[in-house]
Image: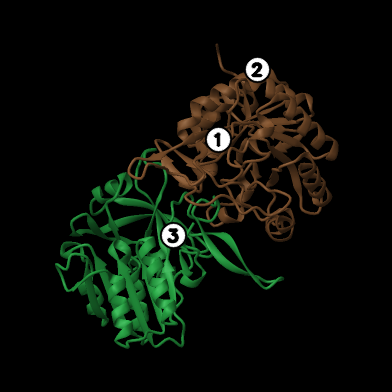
Chain colours: A green, B brown
Amino acid sequence: MNFIYNITVKILSKQEVVPTIYLMRLRAPEIAQNALPGQFIHIKCSKVNYPLLRRPLSIHRIDKEKGEIYILFQVVGESTKLLAQNEVGDDLDIIGPIGNGFNIYPESRKIMIVGGGIGVAPLLALCEESIRQGKEVRVLIGALRKELVVREESFKVLGAKVDVATNDGSYKYKGLVTDLLERIIKEGWLADQIFACGPKLKLKKIVEVSLDAHIACQVSLEERMACGIGACLGCVCKIKTKDKEKDKVKHEYKRVCVDGPIFEGSEVVWDD
Amino acid sequence: MINNPNLEVEIAGVKLKNPVMTASGTFGYGEEFSPFFDLDKLGAMVLKGITLKPKMGNPPPRIIETPSGMLNSIGLQNVGVEMLIKEKLPYLQKYNTLVIINISGDTIEEYVELVRRLEEVSKEMEITGLEVNISCPNVKKGGMAWGTDAKSTYKIISNIRKATHLPLIVKLTPNVTDIKTIAQAAEEAGADALSLINALLGMAVDIDSREPKLANISGGLSGPAIKPVALWLVWQVFQTVNIPVIGIGGIIKVEDALEFIIAGARAIEIGTANFINPRVTIEIIDGIEKYLIENNIKDVNELVGSMKI
């Protein structure tokens, strides 16, 4: 609840990094100062009532020194289409930073970061922070085909070892990013923590693979969202929690926006 | 030239510093909006609907955007009255804004027990009044079932009336054939004010999977899309009852609020717009004051129901 702002920010740069996927740099000192990897901003994409609601987008990079944040997004509907039509110098009405952020355990030495498709969006900030903390970081990027592989170089520049999987084999490992993860674990590179973002089914599989290998795994979840500040209870996901009094497992709906978007994979109830 | 027009209105015997309230379910427990503006500026705050026991709510997806509106099927997820008293209301003690608790239940006994519990703590917790939800479209039992029939409306409200001295606002559903008979029944049963409308029942379909977009199949439609329906119903109810009417439905800017006031609303509640602009309530309060000054109206009450026909 601390440090959340509703401000107008300027677009400093815009780039279509691969077809339909855009990188935008925003001047937002208040948000950059307070943001944590894994948090998001809630953007008003339309100036009129259609589309009506804001859209939540992960913070892709946090540059505290320059007071800037980056977003990486794919055009999938009306709102993201309008967002992509903005030009350098235009203003955006945003709320943020929102959410809990990834929890990098101090004792973790080796970190595995797995992103499927546009799911790499929140992971660059995480990679940067992990490396700043002196962790050894490996990144796995999954995409349908070569043209949709995004930000490989940006992760490399930070000092992470990057592997890529494409479904059609048009670039590097042929197959699913989850297969690649399994292979790397089998080869004996065991992370202390795995962090993942991507489509729900992929996350479910990544959590299964992680837990089989006894590795803690945090996932960044998505859900249809209205307010983004914890008021409407629209964006919930089912989470296993311990009933303190009776010491038994119970299920409850937690808000992706402010209780998440990052959850321990072992606590998420997937089949809902 | 008017410099300081009066914005104060009286609802259910309670003086509100201005006619702008928050609609239940769109403003959490108040605290969620405290980073964005001073809650003391509100006419009144209506908190997220509460039930006697905690409620888990409906499975996701619970939200779908529709043209100039949204469907929700939250299903009254809430912490239950004891947690409300223990963990949510104490935070609001530092504010002077009036706090109205929106209440729901499955049975008359549940409503009555809930009302008694709230009455018990009303002084200590500074509870101003109650808004009785007999119009929730997203729960199987109770909820809207009470408010779609004049007899059951009378029955539930008269029972609640006997259980409390707190000011009672009854929130009406638009999903009825004749809202006027329901409004009359609520008035006769002892309601001090009526608020309307709750969300309209609606649905959206995914044409690829051919599944409903909401896990609950149906949901409540809210937002600018429903404003004309809400205005028409407010106008009809205003002409039917002698108690104050609170207008709700798609208010997103000051002009919308003024339309409702002119159509007979003594106060208004702002709902879905809070999700888009967390400061919208304050902007509308300022806008109403500006309108009164520009039109040389010294008291907002002069505007209530002033529609020329």
Q: Is residue A196 visible?
A: yes
Chain letter for mark 1: B
- Mark 1 residue element: loop
Mark 3 vs mark 2, CA separation in Å? 45 Å
Q: Amino acid at mark 3?
A: Gly
SS state under label 2? helix
Residue A158 horizontal/vertical position (percent): 26, 79
Label 3 with label 2: CB-CB less than 8 Å? no
Using the rendered view, name the quadrant where residue B210 is placed.
Answer: top left
Q: Is residue B304 above or below residue A62?
A: above
- Classify residue A103 as left or right of residue A161: right
**Which chain contains the residue that carries disc 2?**
B
Residue on which disc 2 sits: B239
Q: Please name the amino acid that badge 2 sits on.
A: Gln
Left/right placement of residue B168 relative to residue A263 reads right
Residue A96, which numbered label? 3
Q: Nearer the viewer, residue B144 or A56?
A: B144
Residue at 29% across, 86% down: A187
Camera sees residue B277 = no
Residue position for label 1: B199
Report the residue that reaches farthest toward the top: B309
Q: In the figure, is residue A145 to the left or right of B151?
A: left
**Real-space Cα separation, disc 3 to disc 1, in angstroms:** 29 Å
| B182 shown above or below A239 | above
Q: Nearer the viewer, residue B69 or A63?
A: B69
Question: What's the CA distance linking mark 2 and mark 1?
Answer: 22 Å
